[in-house]
Amino acid sequence: MPKIMDEKELQSLLGLLIKEYRFIGPVRKDLETGFGEIKSLKELVKDYTNTIEPPKYLFLTPQETLFSYEMKKEEITITKTEEQGHAALGDRPSLWSEGIAVEPLQGKAIQQVIFGVRPCDVHGIRMMDKVFKEDFDDTYYQSKRNKTIIFSVTCTSVSDYCFCQSWGTGPSLKDGFDLLLTDLGDRYLIETGSKEGNEIIGKMRLRDATPMELKQKAAVIKATEAKFTRKLNIKDIQQIMISQPEHPTWKDKADRCLSCGNCTSVCPTCYCFDVQEKGDYNPSNMERYRLWDSCQLLEYSQVALGGNFRRERISRLKQFMMHKLSFSYPQYGDFHCVGCGRCIKWCPTSIDLTEVAKDLRGE
Amino acid sequence: MSVRNNAYVPEMATIEKIERETNDVNTYTLTFKDKAKQKDYSFAGGQFNMLSIFGFGEAPISISSDPQDRNEIQHTVRKVGGVTEALFNLKEGEVLGMRGPYGRGWPLKEAKGKNILVVAGGIGLAPLRPVITQVIKNREEYDRFELLYGARTPGDMLFTDEFDHWQKVKNFRLLFSVDAVPKDQRWDHNVGVVTTLFDQMSSTPSRTIVMTCGPEIMMKFALKALLARGFNSSQIFLSLERRMECGLKKCGHCQIGEKYVCSDGPVFPWAEIKDIPEIVGWK
């Protein structure tokens, strides 16, 4: 049953979570808002539409050790793997200096809370969960994911880039969260979506939401829905995206693509990585690690003897957009696009996949 | 979580034997250090392992030995890049990492009772050797067998010491071709790319399964020639090469359209991939 809390109760809930868990939430990063570890409520940003980065980087870290090993003559020994307690390396020292899941909180299965995850990103996490589960378990992803509470917030604002409404992945959320907060103006509606969420809220003495307050939530969602300016027509999109690989819009966009890989870095459902070996002159200190990779980079499809299956920039751009809006569906039963609009916002040359889809549809 | 349950951590394997095939191709005979692992390990022809050369990295390499031989595993490797060059510096008795097998192999079950046509180019014969050894060992289960094999020069042909044995097998026909014959090498067979052998071949589309592996350009031409001769899209099987970092359907690199080459392939019936936008141009 959805509950009601006031500002003071919300503050005390967040305060408790900050105290008990590694607490990650929206913080100010220059002119933008991004996720960061929060030690004090004052750091929390409330007036944001979405974060720069999707929360995927908390589970698929930008760089992480797969295992360390020692090399002696004729003898190689695996010494440590990530889930046994390596500090994760990352590009954000403030967040990653301590690593993640290094010191388990006493007896707690859940170790971190991500607060302020938007509905689109919750869907992104749901899709990534499948990728890192299917056929082979990825223990590195799962060991972090399984220890995380997702605290989502219903959207009340919409940016020029948002088009989650077209997919039904926002601005509201039906499942995939542990906790979900909706701002009703002078009160908050809080819902739980898991046993862990129930346990957290169960400790607080909150009253049930009235039917009127549930109607208020619906009105908040409706008001948000009215704000969308960007749309993606998803009817037959799986076929439409691949039906005209020679359409001039591809060349038009590829001509100004810089192959920078921003689109894939900020995409909540991009998961590609490269695996590399790290060593120094001390053979007892060797490591195999993985780091994010991007299908937009030339080296991504390179094979031995100088072979490359996507040498042309246009072929790489097609791979990104066709994978998101077509190939992912037969692979996972999801289109790997949640309408967050980050790939459009952060493209230095304003390449817009909703525009490409429109062109291919002939609209 | 034990290391053993971690799909990314390889098992240790010993190089039992190194055999030189050509100037830049060696066959490595490997056994897992863990005897139980060796006993449990089984694979199908056409599948691959991820081989780790510690200090250098990991690469997908197809298995070239007999699937029924559970005592050892062979990889026939061409020296072409960082990892394979590092492998060529290892000696017998040294250790590398191995995990697998991964992927879908050749359709030997589907081929039962039928004719088999193998079209191979260069190192592409390596993943097809398990097919040849299996057909020889279980000769009565298959009908006619024909191999079209092409290489750059006579000196680049793999497994030449096994050709005599293969020639003698009942209902086996072998056709060889090379692109060029250097002055110091002797050659009694066809000269030209492997597809020039199609005019001499006796295989017909009737009750035949085609298996092909080689450079992509070779497979494209072989495919065209086969389709032109009336072979249909569900009787032609190709083994594709793509970059792979994991073999586990995670790293993303090997995708073509909706397919992961590491797990949906590397062997595909043409019917399954012919409509993928990146492949359509082959026809």
Image: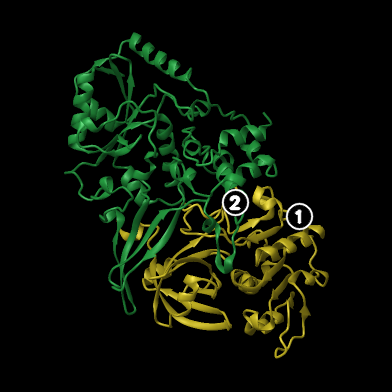
Q: Residue at x 63, y 32 (%)?
A: A358
Report the Cα–Cα distance between label 2 and label 1.
33 Å
The residue that label 2 is drawn on is A313
Q: Residue furthest top?
A: A212
Q: Nearer the viewer, residue A22 or A72?
A: A22
Q: Residue at x 49, y 30 (%)?
A: A161
Q: Residues within 10 Å of mark 2 (few under 14, many from 20)?
A: many
Colour approach in the figure: by chain
SS for dot 2: helix
Label drawn at residue B232: 1
Q: Colour of chain B?
A: yellow
Place residue A218 in its image quadrant.
top left
* Residue B246 placement, left or right of A100: right
- One can see residue A342 in this view: yes
Q: Which amino acid does the dot numbered 1 rest on?
A: Asn
| Vertical comparison of A188 with B46: above or below | above
Q: Name the tint of chain A in the rendering.
A: green
* Image point (41%, 42%), residue name: A129
